[in-house]
Amino acid sequence: MLINTINAFSYNNARKDPLFEEALMYGDVLIPDGVSIVRACHILNAKSKPWERIAGWDLFVYEMSRMNEPLENQKTVPYWKKVHPERTRPVVMFMGSSERVLGKIREQAAKSYKNIDVVTYSPPFRPQFTLTDNMNMCKAINDADPDLLWIGMTAPKQEKWAYSNWVRLNINCHCGTVGAVFDFFAGTLERAPLAWQQAGYEWLYRLLKEPKRMWRRYIIGNTEFLYLMFREWAKF
């Protein structure tokens, strides 16, 4: 199951990038990772009207906690055990980011999720992967045959890669494209305090922390999103 998230930044970019739009539209699950998306769905009377934002981090914690539950504490046989009966622990794979960040992820996972085996792979840093890169990445995933797969290469690169290479992956598990979650979990990027998250201002916190990198995404991007939503609303 391919799980993607969408926020105002993703929405804006998907309108200009047909492959990204297709990846979001035809993945298995699309989660609203932004208060702006949740509110827009209600204002525009969309078919799907989520009641709350579900951040990529929330998805990550839910899936990891589920995998970390000891076998003896579960009333039924977990899915990963049915798929891989020979395993005594589930395998979770992290595909993306640098080896430095992945090293910190392995260290943190050993402390926070002691009942999980972690596999990592750092792909080459290029604007666009070569065919050889793609084949090596797919082989690494297939060889690991994970019970849960996380892909973190920032949007829209991660969504487009997962969607374009999905048919090459011989896996039977949930796969989430979660971007910054790799850095949050590794501790290389600080997430907004809970009060900011609950108020819907996590984007503002990131803008204040990294203005040079985030100003275009949030100042120009959020303005563009509001304009697009107003234009959609004016059609009613």
Image (tube, grey):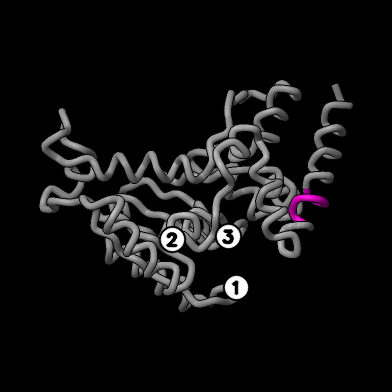
Label 2 sits on what residue type?
A: Ala
- Residues drawn in magenta: 216-221
Please tell me whether mark 2 or mark 1 is closer to you in this view: 2
Disc 3, SS: loop
Front residue of 127/165: it is 127
The picture places residue 106, in percent across and down from the top left corner, at: 33, 64
Dot 2 or dot 1: first in sequence order is 1
Compared to residue 225, the image places residue 16 above or below, namely below
Disc 1/disc 3 C-alpha distance (Å): 13 Å
Label 1 sits on what residue type?
A: Gln
Q: Badge 1: how crowded within 10 Å, few (<14), some, or many (20+)?
A: few
Q: Residue at x 80, y 34 (%)?
A: 229
**Residue matched to label 3:** 154
Disc 2, SS: helix
Q: Residue at x 50, y 63 (%)?
A: 188
**Residue matched to label 2:** 186
Is 94 situated left or right of 234 in this image?
Answer: left
Q: Badge 2: how crowded within 10 Å, few (<14), some, or many (20+)?
A: many
Please tell me whether mark 3 or mark 2 is closer to you in this view: 2
Q: Badge 3: how crowded within 10 Å, few (<14), some, or many (20+)?
A: some
Q: Looking at the rendering, in which quadrant would you find the C terminus?
A: top right
Disc 2/disc 1 C-alpha distance (Å): 25 Å
